[in-house]
Image (cartoon, grey):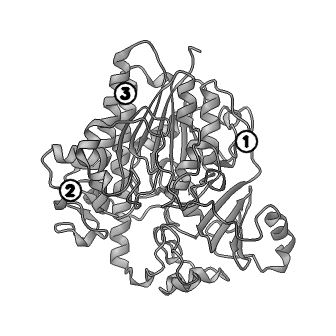
Amino acid sequence: MPDRPNILLVTTDQQRWDTVAALGARGLCTPNLDRLCAEGTACIRAYCANPLCSPSRASLLTGLAPSHHGCWTVGVPWVGRHITLAHRLRRLGYTTGLVGKGHLQPCLWPGSPEAAPAIFSSEHFARWHGPYHGFERCALTIGHTCEPHAAGMHYGLWLRRQGIDPAAFFGGRRSHELAGAPGGLWNLPQELHSSRWVADTAIRQLRTWAGRGGGQPFLLWASFPDPHPPFVAPDPWYGRQVARGGAGSPAIGAPRHPVDRPALYRLALEGRAAQCFPPDTLPPAGFDPNLDHRGIDQDESTRWRHAYFAMIAQMDHHLGRILDFLDHNGQAGRTLVVFTSDHGELLGDHGLWGKGPFHVESVVRVPLLWRWPGRIPAGRRSTALFSLLDLMPTLLAAAGGAVPPGLDGVDQGPVLQARASELRDSVHIENRATPELQLHTVVTDRHKLTLHLPGGDGELYDLASDPQECRNLWRSPDHAALRAQLAAGLPTRLDPPPDQLVPRLAYA
């Protein structure tokens, strides 16, 4: 099929849906995301399948919900050997590559290829470049900004080859722990940043493929680790954001006083969230129950926001370099570009930071931009519901492949090409934070319901009249019928995760 598109999948980590200037974000500099909006279609109601890194990424690649692929939280591997988008496109004659953060396996288990000590083996990463989950050629990193393990894998090898001592820049989880990095400013030179490395490596791979000739289509996943915390950014990006001022969209970090939320919210604000979990159980991944949110003062939260938006601006700059390469090499017209993130970030909303078992819009909703000249309308905003589960079948169909049965995602091609207004009447978000704490959310055109298990407490919001989710209608007698209707398809008891006592880590 000579018209099969190249596919460039660009992802970030923990980027909120409301951080694109062209879509209304204030105080942000995103000219290249804006460019994609102008040249393609923005899906402004896109949701992740799970608000944590590994489960969301596994769902994006397989089209399966976490309960079906088995990676139910960060720190556990996939169950079985699942066929990914990369596997399927290789069968269609595509060459495939992954550059940047994979996080497709646990990053804390010693036996995992994405965990210490394996990630610090320069000898291994000097000779190994795949395959990995269907990607033939890989250049990987793991971790974020100044974390110690962020200087591992192929990125860490590259740093050491530049004569860099990682201990000088990597070692703290909070920005002020780094010498020379007060507040949200990181002392790492910008030319050594992972965003620069991802773009450089992606462009180098694209150039290699172009040099082969023959017109073989490609799938390249360029996966930026930012803007995941720790919230630090180098100059000039941090300084520019401070000078620009602003804290993003008006809703970001706005003080809110939600009524009748489940106890988890109140206890988290009081630093007592550990009371929500039975003794001797793991806390939810991505959520520290010992974190006292009252300890984050206004000055620190401002620095963190400035750093967060600086990280996005820096990523946007390097995204532009990749797009420019496609333009200059005549590939833009035949390349389907998709930009999204695995999940969002609270960033002070409702007084909370990070992610975890809080299914507010800023955590579960993600940016989703599509560009395919001549196939996807330019300058369009789609309000159709979209799940990241839909990426795999949609991209597979665009490449001329048959969408296999049994997927949880759907082919949204007709929506993207404006041949259908919508294909979903709801999206489902599941979060098995621990075996003893699970959240299940259903989002419709207007409403969002989240069921907390065990106990059956929950949240119900009218997103049309209450987009900031300040009025929980769960106990409202006037909304009892709606609550029952929305909850009808959700589990009523804890769903035990698969037996994963034996790691299954060697996937190609």
Mark 2 residue element: loop
**What residue is at 54 percent from the left and 24 percent from the top?**
5
Q: Which of disc 1 and disc 2 is earlier in sequence?
A: 2
To which residue does mark 1 refer? 406
Q: Characterize the local packing of mark 3: few (<14), some (14-19) or many (20 or more) Cα atoms within 10 angstroms.
A: some
| Occupied quadrant, residue 501 | bottom right
Furthest-left residue in this view: 163
Residue 188 disc label: 2
> Mark 1: which amino acid?
Gly
| Occupied quadrant, residue 402 | top right
Q: Which of 376 and 103 is in front in this view?
A: 103
Q: Is residue 348 above or below residue 211?
A: below
Q: Is residue 76 above or below residue 57?
A: below
**What residue is at 54 percent from the left and 77 percent from the top?**
281
Mark 1 residue element: loop
Quadrant of the image containing the N terminus: top right
x, y percent for residue 492: 77, 70
x, y percent for residue 302: 36, 71
x, y percent for residue 69: 62, 50
Q: Is residue 266 above or below residue 205?
A: below
To which residue does mark 3 refer? 206
Q: Marks 3 and 1: which is nearer the front?
A: 1
- Apparent side of residue 219 relative to residue 404 in the rendered image (left or right): left
> Mark 3: which amino acid?
Leu
